Image: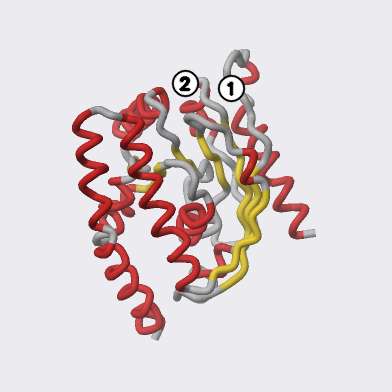
Amino acid sequence: MRILKNIPFILWMIGSLVSIRKFRKPIEVYREQGNHEKEREAIQKVIAYWGPKALKRFGVTVRAEGLARIPDGSVLFVSNHQGYGDIFVILGIITNKQFGFIAKESLRRVPIFGKWVGRIKSLFLSRNDARAALTVFRQGEEWLKDGFSLVIFPEGTRSRGEEMGHFKRGSLRLAVKTGVPVVPVSISGTWRLFEEKGYVRSGDVRFYIHPVIETKGLSKAEAADLADRIEGVIRGKLDEWNA
């Protein structure tokens, strides 16, 4: 029964992703040319076109705060991870900036969607291969230095509920190594969009962008505590909402 209830979502997903084929060529051309600025612009356009449509189609209402805090230039968005809906909400709300995701390897294998996630400058992480993970993070560092932005979920897996897991300490090395600003993001309610019932449904989500945390010039102690510091910021807003 759950599979049947997900059929409308699957059909819409296939159709909508096929419809954005027109955005593929510019991204690939600019990428081949090494024109990072134009590539970022092309990625931002497809995000702005597709993301809000996904939220509207499935009746997801997002109360978003703090969007004006997002700075220009390359940033690392750091968010808690309640469910699959986090990806769709971020794509639907942050529409004025290029970004890709650091996502688990299995997302790459999702038909059509996996290819598009990769096309917008995302990286896929295998939890069971430490050497491959190191390569992924090094590539992420290069992209951040080239002006691209990334989203990372430092819990490493979906919480599937209101309780937030602890951040993996090595997850923030991307920001420390490159000196790019960190933009903490708190999200609540996304687990109800799929994980609660096992099928896609409408719902209300809260989305909060915190003040930017600069990473240039951190001492070794400050860098080592960065993951805990950002976890505390994001958790604090979730606790406030839950209260």
User: In the rendered image, which quarter is residue 141 located in?
Assistant: top left
Q: Residue 110, percent across and down?
A: 28, 59
Residue receiving disc 1 = 215
Residue 170 appears in the rendering: no
Amino acid residing under circle 2: Thr
Q: Is residue 173 left or right of residue 118?
A: right
Amino acid residing under circle 1: Thr
Q: Residue furthest bottom?
A: 1
Looking at the image, which is closer to me, 132 or 149?
149
Residue sitting at x 45%, y 75%: 199
Asked if 168 appears above or below 86 in the picture, the reply is above
Q: Residues within 10 Å of mark 1 (few under 14, many from 20)?
A: some
Q: Residue 84, percent across and down?
A: 46, 60
Residue sitting at x 49%, y 45%: 96
Residues at discs 1 and 2 in contact (Cβ within 8 Å): yes
Q: Is residue 114 left or right of residue 219?
A: left
Asked if 93 appears above or below 223 in the picture, the reply is below
Quadrant assignment for the C terminus: bottom right
Quadrant assignment for the N terminus: bottom left
First in sequence, mark 1 or 2: give its number.
2
Q: Is residue 168 left or right of residue 237?
A: left
Q: Is residue 15 left or right of residue 213?
A: left
User: In the rendered image, which quarter is residue 60 located in?
Assistant: bottom right
**Which numbered disc covers residue 178?**
2
Residue sitting at x 65%, y 60%: 63
Looking at the image, which is closer to me, 57 or 76?
57
